[in-house]
Image: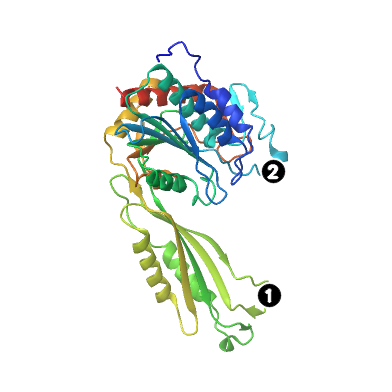
Amino acid sequence: MHTAAAIPTDPVALTADLIRCPSVTPEEGGALTLLQAVLEPAGFACRRVDRNGTANLFARWGEKRHPRSFGFNGHTDVVPVGDRAAWSVDPFGATQKEGLLYGRGATDMKSGVAAFAAAAIDFVRRTPPDGAVILAITGDEEGPARDGTVALLDWMAQNDEAMSACIVGEPTCPDFLGQMIKIGRRGSLTARFTATGRQGHVAYPHLARNPLPAMMRLLDRLAGHALDRGSDHFDASTLAITTVDTGNPATNVIPAECRATVNIRFNDHHSGATLTQWLRKMASDAEEDGVRIDLRTSLSGESFLTPPGPLSDLVARAVERETGHRPELSTTGGTSDARFIKDHCPVVEFGLVGKSMHQIDEHVEIAQIHQLKSIYAAALADYFA
């Protein structure tokens, strides 16, 4: 039934209600329960897809497995508030003042979830499309991310559910709304080195095997190595040394062990496997008599790219129509759940300005939440036109 006279869904009120849910990873905090209560009256079939204590929500309006099934992805979990006394407002109070809405998750990313949920509700009520609208919302993006969007995608595969295109509503704009769409992300690989020698007295170094020189030599070579010069859509890959530790408080003891960790953010010149192979060779080359260097790696995600095309064009048009800015297509920043969705369907990311995310007094411009809803609504309208 055509319901053009329906009262528009207020994305600011919904953002505020979500902020009041203390959904610090891995707690659901009532956020997904709230969204389900909002979506079901609009005709969305909702299913909680909880796995290993992590809460997730799948919601679909329209026909299952329709060839035109437009999806949105986001998360309601938030990082801890830190020093609560340092906040000028209640982190979960959703305080509004001087055109800003404050609270943990205001930027990252309860405003984005509220904006696409409000846009989807109003769209299907006013102009029911020939197709399906899907919302895949997780409570495990800020945490290990093993049982969040991955669990939703696993459940979708098992239950013959699918999206044909997807927008992830993460904050993507560095300075102003409409500045940037993310069409890919760098990969992230963490490498943990352990150099093992033999403990001894500093006055008799010939009786010990100090692991520190070998580790320092390895780290210096890693830090001084240029991985690449970038590619068509990616900046140059980077390697950062994040910690070095011996656990040795004594000045007269040569330690038996030294540990160090590096993180590599890499572009499409590399893969987790090729980088691991390179790191293993570098570690082997730095070893010396009596000192062994072991390596353990963990891969958060490979680099990926959604080539510029129909989906990025559609979102860019919606952004430019609502903001007057033609967004840059970028692959900068950290990782996101788009790294999982890219194996399911074409995916891009677009959301608010991310300056205050994870900070004390996290906040968002109220007017921009309304704009973001309009952008998502315009993308839906164009997709189903």
Image quadrant in which you'd find residue 269: bottom left
Helix, strand or loop at mark 2: loop
Find residue 287 and name its label. none
Q: Is 190 situated above or below 53?
A: below
The residue carrying mark 2 is 83
Point out residue 384 in the picture as x, y percentages from the top left corner.
Answer: 31, 25
The amino acid at mark 1 is Ala
Question: Badge 2, how many Cα within 10 Å: few under 14, some, many 20+?
Answer: few
In this rendering, the label closer to the viewer, 1 or 2: 2
Q: Is 238 situated above or below 382?
A: below
Helix, strand or loop at mark 1: loop
Q: Is residue 206 left or right of residue 45?
A: right
Q: Is residue 213 left or right of residue 188?
A: right
* Residue 334 visible within the image: no
* Residue 302 visible within the image: yes
Image quadrant in which you'd find residue 3: top left
Label located before the other in sequence (1 or 2): 2
Q: Residue at x 50, y 50 (%)?
A: 147
Depth check, front residue: 161 or 93: 161
Point out residue 125 in the picture as x, y percentages from the top left corner.
Answer: 43, 19
Question: How many numbered circles does the render carry?
Answer: 2
The residue carrying mark 1 is 250
Q: Residue at x 45, y 64 (%)?
A: 297
Depth check, front residue: 112 or 354: 112
Q: Residue at x 45, y 20 (%)?
A: 122
